[in-house]
């Protein structure tokens, strides 16, 4: 017997009123003892989170951005938390911290905050896999630099690190993006610049010690330094995924790139 129009309309109405599953997006306040202030973060927990410990991806914003950038500019991120059943944490890295512990400005201690204080806070508040096998970090631009810099320096914290359009070598840009405020000028403090660039952290890696995924568009002003990083990693026989496609330094590119980054992290967590 064919369904009546009333039956079909009732079924459609039932579908309409049943809410679709959706990740929970919270803005939280976290305390940094190193900087003596409260710092906001966005925490995305998947809709189907139960009592099973979940992996966590720390997702960093870029220069002049903030903790809310990812959920505002790429709202699909919350759906990816559901899809891959992972917690996503978007810290606030300040306007121009570059995620360093600044030797020039003691009020900027973001390496300690992101890789120690915030990680401990998240593990204390949520049901997480509290070891490097269940923890990854990635980000865009300044956050791409930050994710690789922190990942390489804290392999006891993160098992995987990624970068989208990352400023992976700061030395060609000595007058840009407030970096001299955090390190001093390159002319006066060359040693600091050498010590705080991702390119000079590669000695910390051994084959397979940190899963790496690096992504940059061919029209990006950071494309050249990403090409050099890829070449140097290959020369050192450090395994990594390197993704290149047409694209510039913008949210259209990052909204696409995050799909690959979180798929990579999901596969890493599953191994």
Image (cartoon, rainbow, N blue to C red):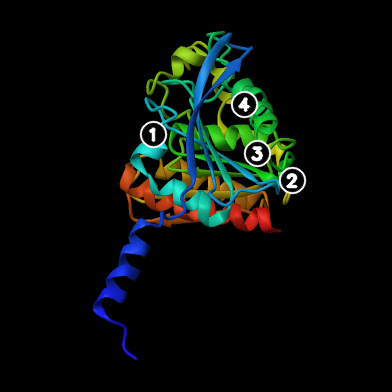
Cα–Cα span, label 3 and label 1 = 29 Å
**Residue that numbered label 2 is attached to:** 206
Q: Which residue is mark 4?
A: 118
Q: CA distance from mark 3 to mark 2?
A: 9 Å
Q: Earlier in the sequence, mark 4 or mark 3?
A: 4
Asked if labels 2 and 3 touch by Cβ distance under 8 angstroms, the answer is no
Q: Nearer the viewer, residue 252 or 197?
A: 252
Confirm whether residue 248 shows in the render.
no
Q: CA distance from mark 1 to mark 4?
A: 18 Å
Is label 4 in a helix, a strand or a loop?
helix
Q: Earlier in the sequence, mark 2 or mark 1?
A: 1
Tag 4 and tag 2, C-beta contact below 8 Å: no
Q: Marks 4 and 2, how far apart in space? A: 26 Å
Q: Position of residue 245 (x, y in %)?
A: 38, 57
Please name the residue shown 61% across and 53% down the image.
Answer: 234
Mark 3 vs 1, N-terminal side? 1
- Percent position (x, y) of residue 11? 34, 70
Mark 1 = which residue? 69
Q: Earlier in the sequence, mark 1 or mark 4?
A: 1
Mark 3 lies on residue:
202
Mark 1 element type: helix
Q: Is residue 56 above or below residue 79?
A: above
Tell me the CA gap for discs 2 and 1.
33 Å
In the image, taking residue 30 as reference, residue 55 lies left or right, namely right
View extreme (bottom): residue? 1
Circles 1 and 4: CB distance less than 8 Å?
no
Q: Quadrant of the C terminus?
A: bottom right
User: As displayed, is residue 181 above or below residue 85?
Assistant: above
Whether residue 68 appears in this view of the structure is: yes
Secondary element at image label 3: helix
């Amino acid at each position: 017997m064919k369904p009546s129009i009333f039956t079909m309309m009732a079924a459609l109405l039932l579908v309409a009123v049943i809410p679709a599953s959706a990740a929970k997006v919270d803005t939280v306040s976290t305390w940094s003892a190193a900087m003596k202030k409260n710092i906001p973060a966005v925490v995305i927990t998947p809709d189907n989170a139960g009592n099973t410990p979940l992996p966590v991806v720390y997702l960093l914003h870029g220069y002049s951005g903030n903790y809310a950038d990812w959920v505002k500019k790429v709202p699909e991120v919350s759906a990816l938390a559901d899809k891959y059943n992972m917690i996503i944490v978007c810290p606030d890295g300040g306007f121009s911290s570059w995620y360093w512990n600044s030797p020039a400005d003691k009020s900027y201690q973001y390496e300690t905050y992101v890789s120690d204080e915030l990680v401990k806070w998240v593990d204390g508040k949520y049901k997480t896999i509290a070891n490097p096998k269940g923890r990854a970090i990635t980000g865009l631009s300044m956050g791409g630099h930050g994710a690789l810099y922190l990942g390489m320096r804290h392999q006891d914290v993160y098992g995987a690190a990624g970068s989208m359009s990352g400023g992976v070598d700061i030395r060609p840009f000595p007058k840009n993006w407030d970096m001299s405020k955090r390190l001093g000028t390159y002319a006066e403090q060359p040693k600091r610049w050498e010590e705080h660039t991702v390119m000079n952290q590669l000695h910390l890696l051994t084959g397979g010690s940190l899963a790496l995924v690096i992504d940059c568009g061919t029209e990006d002003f950071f494309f050249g330094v990403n090409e050099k990083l890829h070449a140097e990693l290959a020369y050192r026989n450090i395994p990594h995924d390197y993704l290149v496609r047409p694209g510039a330094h913008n949210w259209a590119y990052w909204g696409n790139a995050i799909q690959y980054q979180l798929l990579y992290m999901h596969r890493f967590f599953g191994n």
